[in-house]
Image (cartoon, grey):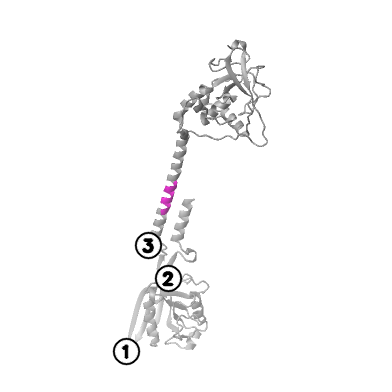
Amino acid sequence: MLGWLYVCSVLCVLYPGSSGRSLEWFTALVRTEYIEPLTNTTVQGTTESGRYGDSSPKESVHGLVGFPRDPAHLEGCHPDTQYNVPGMSTEAMEGGDPWIALVARGGCTFKDKVVNAARRKASAVVIYNEAKSGNATVPMAHLGTGNTVVIMVGYPKGMDIMELLRRNIPVKMVITVGTRLVQEFISGQSVVFVAIAFITMMIISLAWLIFYYVQRFLYTGAKYGNQGNRKETKKAIGQLQLHKVKRGEKGIDIEAENCAVCIENYKPKDVVRILPCKHIFHRQCIDPWLLEHRTCPMCKLDVIKALGFWVEPDETLEIPVPESIAGSSLSVGTLSFAQEENRSEINNMPTSSTSDTLHQCNSAKEDAGETTALLGDPGSEDIPGEQIQNSGDPTSH
């Protein structure tokens, strides 16, 4: 996106208004000849000071030079402009003898000047530039002027010819095609502007890249910054009490009781973990949760701290779990086990579960990384005796 903006800005700078200009232009050789009355000598001069208009035929033309009769309207903008051609009568002008109109720039469009002069049978139009422009010439757009040759000359050249005409001295002019040049759209200011725009775009792009990688580094650090405490957390989870559910044991109805995380009923041989808050869950459901969040999903007890372990709180991510959701009414029996011969004390504590915890449990069951070493084989019959207490089984003591 930034690259396209840069390309567009460069094109706008390099080709401002280029749709109305040609890519090439031609100079015009202007040769003048007149007789100086004071010395009765012929004066000739040739300069490549003219420039053909964009729509002008690139042809040679010759004839006497004329100018507007009204000194206040030397631009030739009025449709009824009358021209004075020293050395040529009005009948000759209207009869088709070649003559060239000399008019000043400004007052109207180039097209209007050419059309008005062509209406007076002028075979060519010479427009001299403004005084502030000096010898410079500019491109001229004048579509619809037919076969009339149009050139522009600098202000000094135009005034030299105008002074002779005002003295009523006939001036012959020959216009020929000069050098073909390619239009130069790039100026010094344009180069500076393009350089500044390029540097600005590079600074913006560099700032964006720095911001992106800083954010990525912070995210990576937050994700893996608590790796040093995971061993302590796993060690603490490993000390939580385990119990294997058996059919028909007192205090738990496997047909009604279910895990608050996965919302599935307990089944015979399911291994459950008993938290310090006396809430129980499937070991496969609660262990991954505790490894990441440390708290009981139901009462939010910090299980790791309750066991006497300390983990920096700013290095762990805790996501609160809603205690209840409207329309959800599920209860889970909680068990309290004690190592007494042929006895188990069971306490039922109402809890609630959410649909969010179901997804967390299911995704945790698919984690085959760190939790595998922690959980072991959920269906194994060989669970360490110091972590499991069986209720209602006389042989468990």
Mark 1 or 2, nearer chain start: 1
The magenta span reads: 200-208
User: Which mark, by number, is residue 188?
Assistant: 3
- Measured from the top left, where is residue 223 in percent x and y? 48, 35
Residue picked out by circle 2 = 138
Give the mark toward the camera: 3 or 2.
3
Residue 379 visible = no
Per the model, the C-alpha gap separating discs 3 and 2 is 18 Å
Residue 370 is situated, as x and y percent measured from the top left of the image, at: 50, 26
CB atoms of marks 3 and 2 within 8 Å: no
Q: Residues within 10 Å of mark 2 (few under 14, many from 20)?
A: few
Image quarter of residue 198: bottom left
Q: Are marks 1 and 2 in contact (CB under 8 Å)?
A: no
Q: Which residue is mark 1?
A: 38
Sequence-earlier tag: 3 or 1: 1
Above or below, 55 against 343 in this view is: below
Which amino acid does the dot numbered 1 rest on?
Leu
